[in-house]
Image: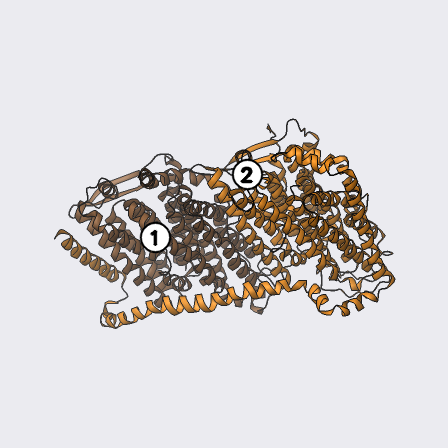
Chain colours: A brown, B orange
Amino acid sequence: MPEVCCIKLFALAISLLAFVASLHLPVHLHRSAAGFQFEINKQWITTPNIHYHMGIDGISVWLVVLTTFLTPLCVLISWTSIHERVKEFFILLLLLETALIGVFTSLDLFLFYFFWEATLIPMALLIGMYGHGRRVYAAVKYFLFTMIASVFMLAAIIWLYSKTGSFDFVDIQNAIRGGHVENFAAAAQWLFLGFFVAFAVKVPLFPLHTWLPDAHVEAPTAGSVLLAGVLLKMGTYGLLRFNLGLFPEQSHQNAWWIVMLALIGIIYGALVSLVQPNMKKLIAYSSVSHLGFVVLGTFSFTQAGLDGAVFVMLAHGIATGGLFMLAGILYERRHTYEISDFGGLATPMPKYAAYFLFVVLASVGLPLLNGFIGEFLVLSGAFQAKPIYGILGATGIIWSAGYLLWMYQRVFFGVVKHDVNKVLPDLNLREKAALLPAAAMALLMGVAPILWLSSIDPSVQTALAPFAQMAAKVVGQ
Amino acid sequence: MTQNPYLWLLPVLPLAGATINGVFGRRSSKKAITTIALVFCGAAFLLALKIAFGFSSASAPYYFDLAHWIRAGNFEADFSFYLDQLSLVMLLVVTGVGFLIHIYSVGYMADDDGYYRFMSYLNLFMFFMLTLVLAKNYLLMFIGWEGVGLASYLLIGFWFTKDSAASAGKKAFIVNRIGDFGFLIALFLIIQHFGSLDFTRVFAAVQPLQPEVAGTGLLTSIGLLLMVGAAGKSAQIPLYVWLPDAMEGPTPVSALIHAATMVTAGVYMVARSHVIFERAPGALTVVAVIGTLTALFAATIGIAQTDIKKVLAYSTVSQLGYMFMACGVAAFSAGIFHLMTHAFFKGLLFLAAGSVIHGVGGEQDMRKMGGLRSFMPWTFGTMGIATLAIAGIPPLAGFWSKDEILWRAYNANPLYWLIGVITAFITSFYMFRLLYMTFAGDYRGSRSSETHGHDDHGHGHGHGLPHESPWVMLGPLVVLAILSVVGGLVGIGNGFEHFLAPVFNTAPGAEIVAEASGEAAGKGMEFFLMGVSVTVAFAGWFLAYFLYSRRPELPERIATRFGAFYQAVVNKYYVDELYASLFVKPLLEGSTEILWKGVDQGVVDASVNNAADSARHVSDRVRHMQSGNLRSYAGWVAAGGAAVIAYMVWMGVR
C-alpha cells in the first residue's frame, strides 16, 4: 500500500524535522546563565489566569532533545511491525511527542498539568490498541495508576492557584520564597506530597512500580521505548523541578524516606530483574533500579548528585530505549520475549549481538559509555550526603552486571537450541539505522559528557541554591 | 613535571586498530587483519621505546592533558596522562609482552573463524591497559580498569558457543565488579576528603599526613577499599575464583591478560597509591596477609591440577600473592620487580603451554601428554627456561625478584618469609611436575587424527603425532626466554630499586627504611636466606623429578593415601561450591520466591489489583462510556478534569 508508506515517511520526516529544530536549543542556549531561556509567555485563558508560558533551562533542554531524538528512532523501529491502523499509530506517536515536549517546557502549572495528562491518552491507546496479549489490562492499569496519582498533583496546583492567583511556576516560586503565600507552612507538607505521589508513580518509585512491568511487556516496541526512555523521566523531572523547586524545606525533611525508597528500588528492582524469564520484564525492572539512582541523586541535594541524576535520566533514555528496540527487533522475528526461547543467537545474528552487547555495556555503566557518568556522579553525591547512601547504591553496579550479562549469555551464547533460531536474519539496514544513532549517542555521552554537563551544572547550581542557604542556616544556629 | 605530547597516542593507537578490525574485519582478508592489528600494536611498542630512550629522571614525571572529561561543580576528571618511572616499567612490559603475544596469536589463532574478532579484542585490551597504566587520575585509571575487565570478558568468552566459556566470562566480569565496588567507594572517600582524584593533588594532600595508628582512620579505610578492588582484578583471596575459570579463553589471552598484564593491575594500583598505604599500616598489614595467604593457598591447589593451563592459573594467583606480600611490607619496588619478571616467565609459560596444546591437537590434560621433548624441542627448551625462572633457580629472572621479596618480607615479619619460602618450594615442585608430566617419559596421548574438544579452535588439521609449532609462535617464545634469563639482572646492586626510587621514596622516613633493609640487618643474613630459597627450589625440583620421572607410580599411591585431603585439593577446597551455596543460590532463589513472586506479585501488585477489582464493579455500570471513540475519550477526560478543577477552585476560594 503506497498510502501506508507515505504515512510512515511523513512521520519520519516530521520527527526528524522536530529533532533538527530542537537542536537549536542546546546550540544557542546560554549555558552558564541562570533561569529560563527561550521563554514565550502568552495569555491563554483569562479566568482562571492560565498562560501559555514555556521556557527551558540547562536541564529541561536535554529532555526535550532526548524526546525528539528517540521519536524518529521509534518511527523507524515500528516500520514493519504495525500492520493495522497504521495512520492512527503514527498520529498517536507524534501526539505523544508533542505532549512530552509540552511537559518539559511548560512553566505554567496548568499547562504543565494539561500536557502531563495529555501524554496519558496516546500512551494508553498505543498500549491498548497495538500491544500484545494482555494489552487492555496493561493499558487500563497504566491509565488508572497515573491518573489517580495525578489528581493529587492537580489538587496541589489548584490550592497554589487559589492562594496566589497564578499558575505561573516562577511567580509561585517567588511567592513561596518571599513568604507571600497564606497558610503555606500548614499546607506545605500536603502540597509536597500531592506533587510527590504523582511523580513517584511515574518514576516509578517502589512500591508504586507494578504498573510498569505490565505496561512494558504488553506495549508495542515504540511504546516501550518512549515509555522507558522519556515518560518515566516526567516523574523524575517533576521531582526535580516542582518538589525541589517549590518545596525545598519539605524536600529536605522528607528526603530520608524518599532516599530509602530509592535505595530499595535500586536493589529490589535489580534483584527482581535478575530472575525474570521475560526479556522485556527484565528490562522493565532494571528501569526501576536505574530510576532509583535518579531519585537517590536528586534527594542527595549535592551538586554531583543532581548533575548525575539528570545525566542518568538521559543515559537511561538512550540505553534502555536501545534495549527495548533490540527486544522489539527480536520479537518481530520470533514473536516472543521469553529468554528461554533463545540461546546461541550470536551465531546466526552477529551484528545484532554486537549492538546488543554495546547497549548492555552502556546500561551496566562501563566507563566511556553514558551509563557510567551519571551513576558515578549520583553515587559520589549520595556518598557525600551520607556514606551509607553511596555504599548501598553502589551495590547496583554489581547487580546490573549480574542481570544484564546473565540475560545476554542466555540469549546469545552457547549453541543454538531451537532450530527456528538457526535461520534468523541479522539486522537489516533500517534496523541498523535505528540502532546506530542510539549506540553512537551512548558513546558520545560517555566520552564527552562535558557537552551536557556544562549546561546541566549551572542549572543544578541554581536549583540547589535554597538548599545551600538551608545548610548555612543550620550551621549558623 | 614535563609535558610529553606523545603520551595520549600510546593508548589511542591500539584503539584505532581495534576499531578498524572490529568494523571492517568481517569483510577483510586475514592478511589485512593481521597487518592492522600488528601495525597499531607495534607502533605503540615503538613509541613506548622512543619515550623510554628519551626518558630522563631529571625531567620526569611527564604528563599530558588531552581534554576535559567530567566537570560537576568542583569535581574535575580529565583525560590526562602521566608517566613516571613506575608507569614506564609498566608501559614497556605491557607494550613489549603485548606485542609479542600479538605476533604469537597470528599463528595460534590462524585457523579460527573469529580471527578478526580476536585481533580486534586484543587491540582493545591494549587500549584499556595502556589507559590504566598511563592515567593521571583515579577515574581515568578506572576507565582502563573496567575496560580491561571488558576485554577479559570478551576474550574469556571468545568461544561463546561453549557454555563453560560464556559462564567463565560472565563470572570474571561480575567478580571483578565486586572488587570495583570497593574501588569506587574508595574513590568517593578520596573525593570527599581531598576534593580531587588527580594523583598529584591527592598524594600532595596525603603526603604531610602522619601514619595512622593501627586499624583506624581515613587512609586505612581508603587503603582497604582499594585493596578490595585490587583483590578482584588481581585474583586474591577471597575474589580469586574467576581466574582459574578464565582459562576457558584462548591461550594467548591467558598469557597476556591473565598472567602478564591485566591481573597485575591490582599490584600496580596499590603501588601507585603507595603514598596512601605507607600512612595506613593497618591496610598494609591486610595487604601483606592477603598476599601471603593467597600465595600459599593457590600454590597448594596447583600441586594437584592435571590441566596444564589450570596449573599455570593457580601459579599466577600464587605469584600475584608474592607481589602483594611485597607491597604489604612496603617493598613496592620489589613487588613491581617481580611483576616485571613474572610477566616474562609466566607469559612464556602460557605461550609455551599454548604451543604444547597446539602441537597435540587441543589436548590440555597433562596425563595425556608426556615425551613431548623430542617432538617439540624449542617449546621444551623455552618452557624449561621459564620453569627454572619461576622456580627461583639462579641466575634466572625469577630468582632475583622473588629473593628480593622474601628478604624484605623477612625484615618485616619472619612469618611472611617462612610462608613465602614454603610457597617457593611448592612452586618449584608443581612447575617441575608440569615439565616432567608434559615433556619427559613417553607420549601418552592418542596418535590418531582425532581431535579433542578441550581447547576448541580448529587445530584438528589431521593430527598424527605431536608437532612443533610454526616460527611465528616460537619467535615470541625465544624472545621471552631470553628475557626470562637476563630480565632479573637489572635488580643486581638494587639497580631496579634505585631506578624506581624517585617514585617510592616518599614514605615517612623512607631513607631509614631503605638503610635498614640494605645494610643494618646484615649482608650475612641476606645471603643465608638466599641460600635457603635456592635450596628449597632445588628440593622442589628433585621431589618432582623423583615422583614424576623416577617413580611415576608413587603420586597415585600418595593420592590414595591422603584421600580426603587430596580430593579437597583437587576440588580446589570446594570454594566455588561454597560460594554457590552461600551467595549465588540464596540470591537467585530469594529474588525469585521472596521478592518477585512474594513481595512484587503477592503483596504489592495483588493489593493494587484487589482495589481495582472493587472499582471494576463500579466501572461496569459506566461501561457504556467506553465507546472506543478517541474524541469521546478526550471529552470525558476533559470533562473529568474540569469537574475536579471546578470543585477545587470552589473549595479553595471558600
Judge from the rendering whether residue B432 lies leftward or rightward of residue B181; answer left or right: right
Residue nearest the viewer, comparing B477 with A207: A207
Figure check: A377 above or below B359? above
**Around disc 2, counting alpha carbons within 10 Å, would you say few (fewer than 14), some (14 to 19), or many (20 or more)?**
many
Judge from the rendering whether residue B114 lies leftward or rightward of residue A254; answer left or right: right
Quadrant position of residue B58: top right
Tell me the element at label 2: loop
In percent of the image, x 53 and y 68: which residue is there?
A341
Q: Amino acid at mark 1?
A: Gly
Q: Residue furthest left?
A: B654
Report which residue position mark 2 lands on: B137
Q: Inspect this view and state whether residue B45 appears.
A: yes
- Are discs 2 and 1 less than 8 Å apart at CB? no
Give the total number of marks visible in the rendering.
2
Tell me the element at label 1: helix
Chain letter for mark 2 = B
Residue B201, horizontal then vertical, whole percent: 53, 34
Report which residue position mark 1 lands on: A235
Chain letter for mark 1 = A
